[in-house]
Image (cartoon, rainbow, N blue to C red):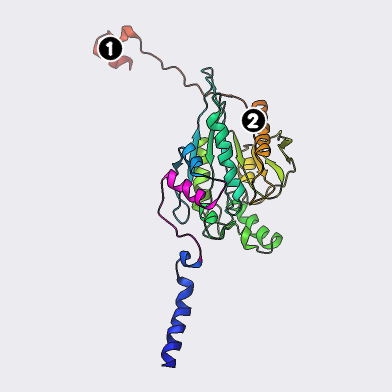
Amino acid sequence: MISQYARALLIACILLPTLPAAHAGQSRPIPLANGQQGCLMMANLLSSISQGDCDLVDFGVADTGTVQQRPILIGEFPARRVLPVDKRPARVLLLGGIHGDEYSSVSIQFRWAEQLASDDERRYHWRMLPCLNLDGLLAGPATRVNANGVDLNRNFPTLAWESRALPYWTQQTGRDPRRYPGPAPASEPEVQWLVEEIAAFKPDVIVSVHAPLGVLDFDGPPPPPPQLGMLHLDRLGAYPGSLGNYAGRSLSLPVITPELHYAGIMPTDAQIAGMWNDLIEWLDTHVGERDRDVEPRPVLPDWSLLLAPPETLLLRW
């Protein structure tokens, strides 16, 4: 009797680490959802996001999901201002939740979505990705890294990644698991997709929100904004594999990184409005409209040739 009990206990101990994540208090991964479902996943976790917020934005879903096949949401806010034919609105990529445990970087996207939705004179084309790392956000407890244990903000294919990222992680962070850059540049599906999205959308500016350092970081071509509301410029440097390093240095795109003061506490409404107003002022001053790549007018055929005998056309063409 005792030996049977001991044998059963041994089998249970062997099998326990292989139980699904949901049994360990984590949310169960689900197949790729639509935009509304994906938004409600965040709203069910974060009290600062409501169902009304999810109804406000008609989120689409990327064709690539997270490691656990959760959706990457895309909110589209095209420009509303009519421009001359040779101009186009600047494109701004607004991004949150690269680190899943930085709740405020996700929630603030919805407050700014309210600004965008109510702006009848919207000057720019905004594309909003409220949470790149939904697996980390919903891990229970939330994690900085994705479901593969990779810090997405150290996984971008920056210059000399192979020779710098892992040595930096080993020597400068003491192999901190929260900052593991991954086995190879762009090894993670979330980063692979965002690299392709940047190439397809061709943003003129990227705004990537983080927490909780309480400063304003900036990478790429100057001039940087001196402040966004209560956040003052304090450039943190470019880490191997970071988005700021990749887009700011490799692609020469301005990358504005507001580092909110707290990961779990939202800024006040007045602080959020102040950050937004300063961002719009900087965009109006330093970005504005862009020159459109106007397609050359087609060369029309000589109508007299079209009336010529067919054999003449063959000789000419």
| Percent position of residue 78, x then y | 50, 29
Label of residue 233 in the image: none
Q: Amino acid at mark 2?
A: Ile
Quarter of the picture holding the C terminus: top left
Residue 19 lies in quadrant: bottom left
User: Can I make out residue 143 in this image?
Assistant: yes
Q: Residue at x 58, y 39 (%)?
A: 111
| Percent position of residue 295, x then y | 47, 21
Magenta span contains residue 117:
no
Q: Residue at x 62, y 60 (%)?
A: 178
Element under label 1?
Answer: helix
Front residue of 149/61: it is 61
Instruction: Identify residue for label 1.
Output: 312
Range of magenta residues: 25-48
Q: Residue at x 35, y 10 (%)?
A: 302
Q: Amino acid at mark 1?
A: Thr
Instruction: Identify residue for label 2.
Output: 280
On screen, 103 above or below 218?
below
